[in-house]
Amino acid sequence: MPDPTRSISSPALLALHGFSGGGADFDPLIKALPEQEHWLGPDLPGHGVSSDHPCDPDSMVDFINSQIPHLPSPRILMGYSMGARAALLHATTYPDCWQALVLISARSGIATKDERVKRHTIDKQRAHEIISLGLPAFLQAWQNQPLIRSQQNIPDEIRTIMQAVRNRHSASGLARSMREFGQGSCPNLEPQLHCLKMPVLLITGENDTPYRHHAETMLPLLVNASHAVISNAGHMPHLENLHATARAIKAFLNDVCRLKHYPNIRSQHSGDRSQ
């Protein structure tokens, strides 16, 4: 186990994966960030070795809390999609815990109670399908959704490892994750965004129109945020265009490390930072 008291030149990174993924999904990205000395990518509740954990929002926050003692300070929290939802939930609950946030394909929540109820009904139906169809058939259908289909552009050697991670999940664990931590079960965090004073990097793929819109909606509500739009990428830009995303994250981390006291470094919309 790493020594949380040791001095490091770059902040430690906790990376939270998306639905049906695993901590290992971040391996290629971290390899593209060789100066990132210390990071942790756990399997989130309902996934992999954490498949039996409860997945409701309070339990997700508790799970993230359980990872913090393994990380030296200062710390940065990164999340992708479902993991970005978890990251934002923890950061708004414990805003002084993190020195910066990296949110990939993030959404702050569903605005109205009626829409959350409708989405929760969809989430419960999908959870039922995971059990009734079985994991392989559900994953095939899930990955053929328009939002997810762009992952077919991920290099074969990475996608093969990703698929192996997904095939190790349990149907009951993924169903619990969908039912208890789907978008319909999570609070709308938009009203709390102004409380986040740390630097925040929002990342979206240029071809992911819905989540580009979500990022553009969040950007003016955050005190200290920038938005990197990654070219030739959809919902999973950190693997669909790995090196462009790594460059955007590296530039952000360099700013965070250089400004040791983390003053306001808000920038204009960064557009396509991959050029």
Image (spheres, rainbow, N blue to C red):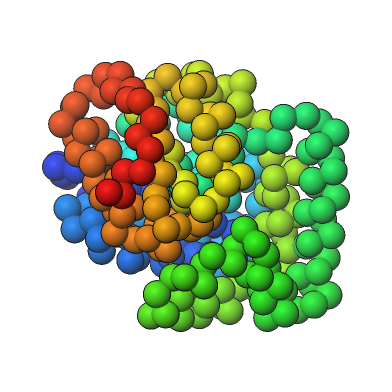
- Picture residue at 56% right of the left edge, 29% below the top: 217
* Up/down of 143 relative to 9, above or below: below
Q: Residue 190's quadrant in the figure?
A: top right
Residue 236 percent across, percent down from the top left: 48, 58
User: Is residue 157 toward the left or the right of residue 247 in the image?
Assistant: right
* 195 or 109, nearer to the observer: 109
* 86 or 58, nearer to the observer: 86
* Up/down of 27 relative to 3, above or below: below
Q: Residue 271's quadrant in the figure?
A: top left
Residue 179 percent across, percent down from the top left: 76, 54
Residue 126 visible (yes or no): yes
User: Is residue 247 toward the left or the right of residue 65 in the image?
Assistant: left
Residue 1 visible (yes or no): no
- Picture residue at 79% right of the left edge, 38% below the top: 116
- Picture residue at 73% right of the left edge, 63% below the top: 175
- Picture residue at 47% right of the left edge, 70% below the top: 153
* 83 or 173, nearer to the observer: 83
Image quarter (top left, top right, bottom left or bottom right) of the N terminus: bottom left
User: Is residue 81 toward the left or the right of residue 237 in the image?
Assistant: right
* 160 or 166, nearer to the observer: 160
Residue 165 percent across, percent down from the top left: 51, 75
How many numbered dots are placed on residues in this image? Answer: 0
Residue 261 percent across, percent down from the top left: 22, 22
